[in-house]
Amino acid sequence: QVQLVESGGGLVQAGGSLRLSCAASGSIFSINDMGWYRQAPGKQREWVADISSGSSTNYADSVKERFTISRDNAKNTVYLQMNSLKSEDTGVYYCSARIRSGLKQFRYWGQGTQVTVSS
């Protein structure tokens, strides 16, 4: 079994910062790409950022220059540093990772962590 557990969400004022973490555990042979998604109230889940196993990064236009994704392969952990937060960044943030266990590779999801930005 593989688990992804997020942490670091909370309530912050507009303009503030938060750092999310997501740790993978369980029967892990290797981790390919890792990423963050978010879902605002009443909206569909949207992609925020991702990072490859070689640490190449991609960002949604809405978070470029404000968010930074990184990973620590030794800890099987991905981070999302969020600066200059806006009210529209409010939502549940989910991490996702493509993980190989044995011969098969699957995409796993965390349970989500709430981020609320007050204006």
Image (cartoon, rainbow, N blue to C red):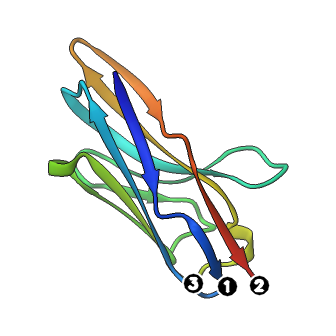
Q: CA distance from mark 3 to mark 2?
A: 12 Å
Tag nearer the camera, 1 or 3: 1
> Which is nearer the N-term, disc 1 or disc 2?
1
The residue carrying mark 1 is 14
Q: Give the answer, above or below, for where 7 lies relative to 108.
A: below
Q: Which mark is residue 119?
A: 2
Say which amino acid is labelled 1: Ala
Say which amino acid is labelled 2: Ser
Q: Residues within 10 Å of mark 1 (few under 14, many from 20)?
A: some
Contact? badges 3 and 2 (CB < 8 Å): no
The residue carrying mark 3 is 84
- Residue 45 percent location from the top left of the image: 68, 44
Q: Give the answer, above or below, for where 1 lies relative to 42.
A: above
SS for dot 2? loop
Q: Residue at x 14, y 49 (%)?
A: 74
Q: Give the answer, above or below, for where 15 lies relative to 69.
A: below
Q: Residue at x 27, y 24 (%)?
A: 100
> Which is nearer the N-term, disc 3 or disc 2?
3
SS for dot 1? loop
In the rendered image, which quarter is residue 107 located in? top left
Depth order, front residue of 80/55: 80
Contact? badges 1 and 2 (CB < 8 Å): yes
